[in-house]
């Protein structure tokens, strides 16, 4: 058994779907007023579920976990940082070296952390 699905609880699934469609250059494979599903090229499924209709009730807000994107080179980290900044994403952490590698963190519209990193361990 291996996890292959990430759910993010969002305020407005349609609005969040537009955000992720643009950011990931993907179209959802399933869409309803309360839920949207993307299948990423890696096979990972990303679900956007309305925090107002999820069962059991959602108790936490965004930012308590991260959706991480490992990339092949530091220059890709810098390029994505420039691109995402230009798109208006809130930046929680500018590109920096940490003990695991080179990274930055942006936030989606619900405060979910989006980390881009080049592992260097």
Image (cartoon, helix red, strand yellow):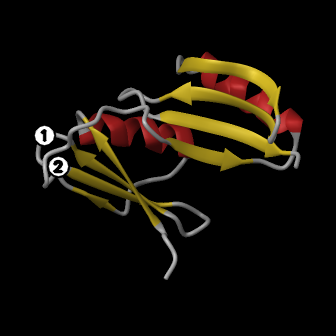
Mark 1: which secondary structure? loop
The one nearer the camera, 44 or 27, is: 44
Mark 2: which secondary structure? loop
The disc placed on residue 52 is 1
In the rendered image of this protein, does residue 115 appear above or below residue 57?
above
Residue 64: % across, % down: 43, 36
Residue 102: % across, % down: 82, 34
Q: Quadrant of residue 45?
A: bottom left
Residue located 61% across and 46% down the image = 68
Residue 95: % across, % down: 76, 23
Residue 116: % across, % down: 68, 38
**Residue reaching furthest front?**
99
Residue located 51% across and 33% down the image = 113
Describe residue 1's horizontal placement relative to residue 98 as left or right: left
The one nearer the camera, 19 or 98, is: 98
**Residue reaching furthest bottom?**
1
The disc placed on residue 34 is 2
Mark 2 or mark 1: which is in front?
1
Residue located 84% across and 49% down the image = 72
The disc placed on residue 110 is none
Q: Residues within 10 Å of mark 1 (few under 14, many from 20)?
A: few
Q: Residues within 10 Å of mark 2 (few under 14, many from 20)?
A: some
Describe residue 82's horizontal placement relative to residue 110 as left or right: right
Cβ atoms under marks 2 and 1 closer than 8 Å? yes
């Amino acid at each position: 058994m291996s996890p292959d699905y990430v759910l993010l609880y969002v305020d407005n699934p349609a609005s969040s779907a537009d955000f992720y469609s643009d950011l990931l250059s993907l179209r959802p494979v399933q869409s309803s007023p309360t839920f949207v599903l993307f299948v990423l090229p890696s096979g990972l499924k990303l679900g956007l579920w309305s925090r107002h209709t999820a069962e059991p009730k959602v108790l936490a807000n965004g930012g308590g976990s991260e959706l991480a994107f490992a990339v092949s080179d530091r220059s890709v980290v810098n390029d994505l940082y420039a691109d995402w900044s230009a798109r208006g994403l809130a930046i929680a952490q500018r590109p920096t070296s940490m003990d695991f590698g080179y990274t930055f963190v942006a936030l989606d519209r619900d405060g979910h952390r989006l980390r881009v990193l080049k592992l260097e361990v």
